[in-house]
Amino acid sequence: MTTEETPHTTEPTRPTSPTGLSRHVQRLLARLRAFDARRPWAWDTTVTLLWTTAALVDASGGWRNIARDPTVPVWLVVTLSLAFALPLYWRRRHPMAVLAVMACAAMVSDVSGAFLQAGYLQMIPLFHLALTRPPLALVWALALILPPLVTGAVRHPQESWDQRVVPTLWAYALVALLGIAVRSRKDYTAGLVDRARRLEIERDQEVRLAAAAERTRIAREMHDIIGHNLSVITGLADGGRYAATKNPERAAQALDAIGTTSREALGELRRLLGVLRDDEAEAARAPQPTLADLNTLITGVRKAGLPVRFDVHDEPTAQPLLAGAQLTVYRVVQEALTNTLKHAGAGAQARVLLTFTPKDVRVEITDTGKAAAGLDQGQGQGQGLTGMRERAALYDGTLETGPLPTGGWRVMLRLPREDSPS
């Protein structure tokens, strides 16, 4: 006869819920620790009364079961029991003094032959010594604990002395090691908490610094975009107004250029603001301007009415610039020509000289207009100069600005190449 076996399936073991008994126990212990921190006297009084009661119960007659001399007076036994138990109230604040008092009581107990079990209460202040005091304190604790043990073993040699001394010392050593372990655990936990707190502070500081740097970068980009395009539009509008009475065709061209420049500025602003929106899943991201866009930039400035001469000196051994450095050169030229449009006055001319060498790239922008003194001191339009200096500093570059001896203004940017020393 054949029997069919039913396949046995084992259900996966579910993880233990974090809201079980252990969590309630941890909460209870946390509440007890918090209560003890607020009212330490309550816990000290409770522990002292508990052990005092136990010591007095033993003093009522149980001490004779292990005593070497059962004829010790009862009043002495009671006194020694109280000497062992009552000092526990100060065990956390003065553990060494409490242990010294207990050691004196232990000496009397062992010499008299009572050998009270309350003497083992010395383990409690010993634990607090290991928990809160330097390691040297344990050496002094041994000097207090050892003499009563040796004296009792020598005075009442009913058994070999090592059977009395060695096991007790091992017990005390285990208590001291327990205190050291708890102390190490507390120090480790406190170190983790302190490290987490410092990491949280550093994270908040990094977030604030990153936000400030991003705000500065955005402000610099918007200043370059809006400032330049508005300056070009202003120049075109002024030119179109003068041309409207004499040459309507030139006025129409100026209006077309104004429309084109405005649309380009709006497009750049939309892309910039689109990246900043949190709800924009796929913001439009266009490539940043490069050196190849300088001709377009200068053409727009020329349409605004500023004659610009653009020269490039390129050595064959010079390597191409990084994209970020090219953006820096573009923005510096843009800002310098914008300042010329604003401040150079009528009849001014500008020149852009771009020089490539194996060690660096240099761009010099000069104009023949009147020097705007406020720019040099950071007044008025000086924020543009600050932005240029910040861009240059990102690539370990230098920016020099100032009036020319023959009149006009000069902006000189130098960017070292990545493979050349600073």
Image (cartoon, grey):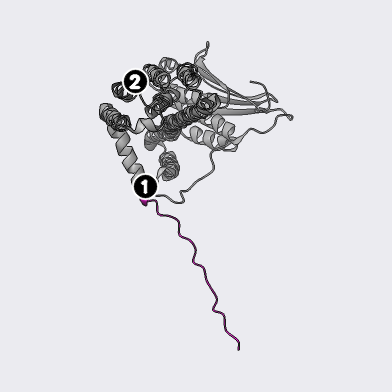
- Residue 195 placement (x, y as % from top left): 46, 30
Q: Which one is in front, 21 or 193?
A: 21
Label 2 packing within 10 angstroms: few (<14), some (14-19), many (20+): few
The image position of residue 7, as x and y in percent, is: 55, 76
Amino acid at the residue labelled 2: Arg
Q: Which residue is drawn at 50% across and 33% down?
A: 302
Range covered by the magenta-colored residues = 1-22
In this rendering, the answer to whether 142 lies above or below 178 is above
Specify whether 96 is left or right of 395: left
Q: Are marks 2 and 1 in contact (CB under 8 Å)?
A: no
Q: Does the magenta stretch include residue 398?
A: no
In the picture of the structure, the residue carrying the numbered disc 1 is 23
**Place of residue 50 in the rendered image (x, y in percent of width and height, measured from the top left):** 29, 32
Residue bearing the label numbered 2: 93
Image quarter (top left, top right, bottom left or bottom right) of the C terminus: top right
Q: Choose top left, top right, bottom left or bottom right for residue 273.
A: top left
